Amino acid sequence: MATTEKLKITAATAQELSTGVLLSGEAQAVLDPAMPPLAFLDALSARDLYADAVQFLSRALPKREAVWWSCLCARDLPADDKQPELGGGLSAAEAWVYKPNEDNRRKAEKAANAIKASHPARWTAMAAFWSGGSLGPPDAPEAKPAEDFTAKAVAGAILMAVALDPLESMARNKRFLAYGLDIAKGGTGRPPARP
């Protein structure tokens, strides 16, 4: 699936990326200043510190890849035929991933705003919108999003997707982190078909 020739995480150490990430005390205890990012993620996973791993990886990945990861995790949830706007939000985020331009970024904003409930699809679309550009209307003075808005929306969407079914949370934690790690290693993150 993935090759190390296409690593998406460019930082040399996990320490470089951990600034601004709210890691638990357990995760901070694992963090060695010289530890490479993927080794840190492996250490977090080995200790079942999945929330820390999701927050760290959402910050470590480039924005486009982070939004893609969030799309995959949200698509992993059962479809909700009563809320077609959820699929619209994910489709808009995916369109931005495939072609990250201003038009698609604004479509992601519109799709996110059409989702009234707090749902992984809404936060995935917001993550695409918050990737750059201005938060204000196109004709207003520019108001740039904070650099970490996309990472926070991605982490929130993925952690919410995990929590939607407590009985599935451990399996989802492992599966979703595997998607993200595959992306980080240059893969597509696409999961194999489930039986």
Image (cartoon, rainbow, N blue to C red):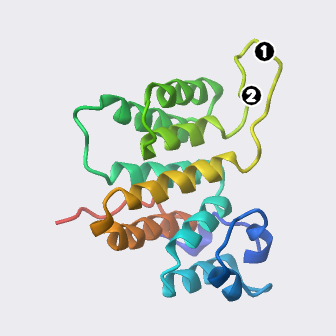
Q: Is 130 situated above or below 85?
A: below
Farthest residue toward the left? 195
Whether residue 6 is visible, yes or no, is: yes
Distance between the alpha carbons at the discs numbered 1 and 2? 9 Å
Quick check: 145 left or right of 27?
right
Residue located 59% across and 25% down the image: 106
Helix, strand or loop at disc 2?
Answer: loop
Quick check: 29 left or right of 171?
right
Farthest residue toward the top? 139
Circle 2 residue: 134
Q: Quadrant of the C terminus?
A: bottom left
Instruction: Place residue 179 in its image quadrant.
Output: bottom left
Question: Callout 2 environment at 10 Å: few (<14), some (14 to 19), or many (20+)?
Answer: some
Residue type at mark 2 is Ser
Circle 1 residue: 140
Quick check: 73 left or right of 142?
left
Which of 173/25 is in front?
Answer: 25
Residue located 48% across and 82% down the image: 48
Residue located 34% across and 62% down the image: 191
Question: Callout 1 environment at 10 Å: few (<14), some (14 to 19), or many (20+)?
Answer: few
Residue located 36% across and 29% down the image: 85
- N-terminal of the pair, mark 1 or mark 2, is 2
Whether residue 13 is visible, yes or no, is: no
Q: Is 27 situated above or below 153?
A: below
Q: Is 93 situated above or below 148?
A: above
Which of 187/115 is in front?
Answer: 115
Helix, strand or loop at disc 1?
Answer: loop
Residue type at mark 1 is Ala
Is disc 1 in contact with disc 2, using a CB cutoff of under 8 Å? yes
In x, y percent, where is residue 8?
63, 63
Q: Quadrant of the N terminus?
A: bottom left
Q: Is 90 situated above or below 40?
A: above
